[in-house]
Amino acid sequence: MSKKIKVWGRFSSSNVKKVMWLAEELKLEVERIDAGRQYGVVDTPAYKALNPNSRVPTIEDGDFVLWESNSIMRYFCMKYGGEAFYPVDPATRADIDRWLDWSLSILVPVESPLFLGTMRTPPEKQDKATIAAGTQKLGEIYAILDRRLEGRDYLVKNFSIADLGLSIFADRWLRNPFLAGRPLSARLSAWIARISPRPGFQKFVGGPLE
Ligand SMILES: N[C@@H](CCC(=O)N[C@@H](CS)C(=O)NCC(=O)O)C(=O)O
């Protein structure tokens, strides 16, 4: 008897989107429960018992509880037949892991404050100097991704969880209306155009930025 996997986390979270989109790719039955930001929940003792970080997403697959969106993606692939998105060949897998780790160590620390300071801050309260500096820095970081995509359709061989995870951030970089003067890379746009027809992208990523 298959039981639905519970995914805790609000729809608007980039990290929840990774999990929901991959579940869609793998045709998993999931039940998403709103939590985080305007929904609260994450600071309750019950949620903290699942995820002491008070962050989303968290999944419950039967008795197994897991947080960290990239780890959840790896787990789904390993457990539910997602080898195509996370091949077992060591070099291919390590390359995918490298880009997912890079997103946490290099990209997100710059991307997240910039996104919160623009899309989630009323225009009259936005700090223009901080936004300009962040835009410059993030442009340099996306140039690394841009160079990686030279001569490639996807980050590592075929479409993988590296493309899935990173395209969510790159899409909102390209579409954020508050980042004046950022370099709009044709290669990044072409990569997103290759990925965006996927139904999971359409359903969870392609809507209005919020
Ligand atoms: N590295 C973690 C980051 C989790 C994280 O920071 N999630 C954000 C949403 S994207 C969050 O929970 N923010 C607080 C909130 O929504 O209340 C992951 O990838 O799962």
Image: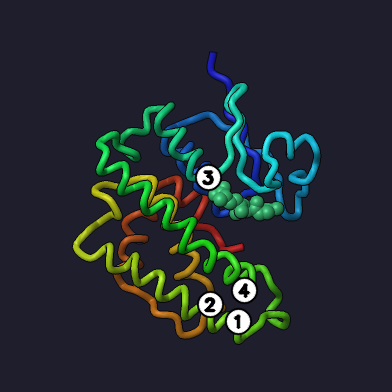
Does label 3 or label 2 sit earlier along the sequence? 3
Q: Which residue is mark 3?
A: 69
Q: Amino acid at mark 1?
A: Thr
Coordinates of residue 102 in the picture (x, y in percent): 42, 57
Q: Are marks 1 and 2 in contact (CB under 8 Å)?
A: yes
Q: Is residue 104 above or below residue 136?
A: above
Q: Which residue is mark 2?
A: 134
Residue furthest to the left: 151
Coordinates of residue 206 in the picture (x, y in percent): 49, 57
Label 1, label 3: how far apart the Cα atoms are: 28 Å
Q: Which residue is mark 1?
A: 130
Residue furthest to the top: 1
Towards the viewer: 137 or 80: 137
Label 1, label 2: how far apart the Cα atoms are: 6 Å
Instruction: Say which residue appears at 71% left-offset and 75% top-offset.
Output: 122
Is residue 82 something that shows in the picture? yes
